[in-house]
């Protein structure tokens, strides 16, 4: 009985291989035809609107050809060894051809061919789909040719549907690729139907058609990416003896084309195929399978109910809408309301201050230029330039009345005015800011421009240049706030800041001359002040030197006179006390001074007769103590 079943299976496989040859040839013809049509559409500017439909079809043809080629190689019988029977010696060409037909070389060539073909088809399909996603379309309507193309696509869908029904109702026993091939057929059918529906409604609702087309492209992209990954991972598995070509065109996405889905059943089969463990017989996994759907639905319901909790940060307020109608203004904190979409909280600023410039142009981006060292005596740095001929991207131009001789004229004045504003702090202002104005900054900017135009239309150029900016800011702020209050948009204008007012070109040129003359005059004044200060300091130094010298000389003479007077008084007192002793002392002092540097020989005439006279030939020098 088993032998009969095996023979039937072999007969079915043989018929399948025979049919696959025709299907593969048909797929190859369709692929060449699709590439030819794509090239024709790409080279004609008037037909490029068809490219968004042609690219998914070309990608689908590439993947179908890869699937059929892998299926054909997988159904081929494994290679057998060459018969060992003796045969006559072949020629050189026949011998070389037989070497190429040997099992090892044939297996290697089949291995390389299968992997290269699958990878090439998948990568080309991904390139087509990425190009279709990245291009921006102008949604150009297609006026002709839609009906014939839809008929062709419907015929293709019918053919694929017939094949899918045959695979579903006539399964081949002991063929593990049956369910995979059925899922790939259903995936191809869904893609063809999506492209047909998108093309049918493209003229009427193009945006919806593009969404449907993108969904079909996303399915193709997922399948092609999976083919590439399986091919890359299969490279590391080298063929062995009795090797059969693997089916590289498997897809988990295609396996989910069934109803009911049973995602855990697919995981169970994968685990059983790889590890040989049937997790369905484990009670824990059986319990998980039974409670999976209720738990998932409970999580979804709880998550939907949690959407009724709204957290508002400190820097914001929230306007709670119940069934689309604003109910109240919520402060910062955690609040409970109806879940989405029945209840919603729309955030509003609470105290955030903004600065708005009246010019539409943005300030230029400053590029980091090489900085030049500023010398003390060199020219001023560029950061200090404040001339009016510089470009001011954030300035607002206004027409000002002025006098040209005896006639009335107009001048264009550029000014930089900034508005500091915020949303009002009360609840009414919060609601008005959200529902009364679509774009608050643009509304404030337009109202401010109207007020500025009316204000400067009554001003003269001379008065405007001499007017204080503080008073002008107060007037402009008051008038703009009045306009905003009439519009009820809930905006509070805090301050209107007049940064700068640049006069017209003629006045700027005149001011340049005045500024240059003023700079030159200030330089001359500073130089003369420096010269005068230098002369004054020099004269003061000379005078102070003479005064100090005279005072030092006078003090020196006074000290000498005081010393002489003290000596005279001392000598006078000494003479009065003992005149004779004083005279002798004075005489001895004079002799000591006179004889201090003269060598002397002293003879004592009172030497006794008992001793012989002695002549002292030694030379004595008086010490310094004698002088004193």
Image: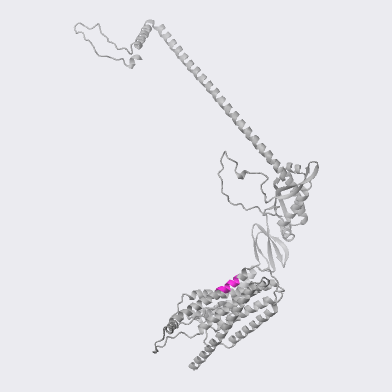
Tell me which residue sits at (61%, 45%) in the image.
Answer: 383
What colour scheme was applied to this rendering of the protein? Answer: one colour
Tell me which residue sits at (59%, 31%) in the image.
Answer: 530
Q: In this view, does 375 lie to the left or right of 627?
A: right
Residue 124 lies in the magenta-colored region: yes
- In x, y percent, where is residue 262? 58, 80
Q: Characterize the magenta stretch by its predominant secondary structure.
A: helix
**Quarter of the rendering containing residue 36:** bottom right
Eyeballing the image, is 185 above or below 360? below
Name the one closer to the observer, 231 or 592. Answer: 231
**Quarter of the rendering containing residue 537:** top right
Residue 96 lies in the magenta-colored region: no
Tell me which residue sits at (47%, 79%) in the image.
Answer: 109
Residue 606 is at least partly visible in this image:
yes
Q: Is residue 531 left or right of residue 241?
A: right
Magenta residues, as a range?
A: 123-130
Eyeballing the image, is 613 above or below 86? above
- In x, y percent, where is residue 43? 64, 72
Name the one closer to the observer, 623 or 89. Answer: 89
Q: Is residue 344 left or right of residue 247?
A: right
Q: Quadrant of the C terminus?
A: top left
Q: How many marks?
A: 0
- In x, y percent, where is residue 478? 75, 49
């Amino acid at each position: 009985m088993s032998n009969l079943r095996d023979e039937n299976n072999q007969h079915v496989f043989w018929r399948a291989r025979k049919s696959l040859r025709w299907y593969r040839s048909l797929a190859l013809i369709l692929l060449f035809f699709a590439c030819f049509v794509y090239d024709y559409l790409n080279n004609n500017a008037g037909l490029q609107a068809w490219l968004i439909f042609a690219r998914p079809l070309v990608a689908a043809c590439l993947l179908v050809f890869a699937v059929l080629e892998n299926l054909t190689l997988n159904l081929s019988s494994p290679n057998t060894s060459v018969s060992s029977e003796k045969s006559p010696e072949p020629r050189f060409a026949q011998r070389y051809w037989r070497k190429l037909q040997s099992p090892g070389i044939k297996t290697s060539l089949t291995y390389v061919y299968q992997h290269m073909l699958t990878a090439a088809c998948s990568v080309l399909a991904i390139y087509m789909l990425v190009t279709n996603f990245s291009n921006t379309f102008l949604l150009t309507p297609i006026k002709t040719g839609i009906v014939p193309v839809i008929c062709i696509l419907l015929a293709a869908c019918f053919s694929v549907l017939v094949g899918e029904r045959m695979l579903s109702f006539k399964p081949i026993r002991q063929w593990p690729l049956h369910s995979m091939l059925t899922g790939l057929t259903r995936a191809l059918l869904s893609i063809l139907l999506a492209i047909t529906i998108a093309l049918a409604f493209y003229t009427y609702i193009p945006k919806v058609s593009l969404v449907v087309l993108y969904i079909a492209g996303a399915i193709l992209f997922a399948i092609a990416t999976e083919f590439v990954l399986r091919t890359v991972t299969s490279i590391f598995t080298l063929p062995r003896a009795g090797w059969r070509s693997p089916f590289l065109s498997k897809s988990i996405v295609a396996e989910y084309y069934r109803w009911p889905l049973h995602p855990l059943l697919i995981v169970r089969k994968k685990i059983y195929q790889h590890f040989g463990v049937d997790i369905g017989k484990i009670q824990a996994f059986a319990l998980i399978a039974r409670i999976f759907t209720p738990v998932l639905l409970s999580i979804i319901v709880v998550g939907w109910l949690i959407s009724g909790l709204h957290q508002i940060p400190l820097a914001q307020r929230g306007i709670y809408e119940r069934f689309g109608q604003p109910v109240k203004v919520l402060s910062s904190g955690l609040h409970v309301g109806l879940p989405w979409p029945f209840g919603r909280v729309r955030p509003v600023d609470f105290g955030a201050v903004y600065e708005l410039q009246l010019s539409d142009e943005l300030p230029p981006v400053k590029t980091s230029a090489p900085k030049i060292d500023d010398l003390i005596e060199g020219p001023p740095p560029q950061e200090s330039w404040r001339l009016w001929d510089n470009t001011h991207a954030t300035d607002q131009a206004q027409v000002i009345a002025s006098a040209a001789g005896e006639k009335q004229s107009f001048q264009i004045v550029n000014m930089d005015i900034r508005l500091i504003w915020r949303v009002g702090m009360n609840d009414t202002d919060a609601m008005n800011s959200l529902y009364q104005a679509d774009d608050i900054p643009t509304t404030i900017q337009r109202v401010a421009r109207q007020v500025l135009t009316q204000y400067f239309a009554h001003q003269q150029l001379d008065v405007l240049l001499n007017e204080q900016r503080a008073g002008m800011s107060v007037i402009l702020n008051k008038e703009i706030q009045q306009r905003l209050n009439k519009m009820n948009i809930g905006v509070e204008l805090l301050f209107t800041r007049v940064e700068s007012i640049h006069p017209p070109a003629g006045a700027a040129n005149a001011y340049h001359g005045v500024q240059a003359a003023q700079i030159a005059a200030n330089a001359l004044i500073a130089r003369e002040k420096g010269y005068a200060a230098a002369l004054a300091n020099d004269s003061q130094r000379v005078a102070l030197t003479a005064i100090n010298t005279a005072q030092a000389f006078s003090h020196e003479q006074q000290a000498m006179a005081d010393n002489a007077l003290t000596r005279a008084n001392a000598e006078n007192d000494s003479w009065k006390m003992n005149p004779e002793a004083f005279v002798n002392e004075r005489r001895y002092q004079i002799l000591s001074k006179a004889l201090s540097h003269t060598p002397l020989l002293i003879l004592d005439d009172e030497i006794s007769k008992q001793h012989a006279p002695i002549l002292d030939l030694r030379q004595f020098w008086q010490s310094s103590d004698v002088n004193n």
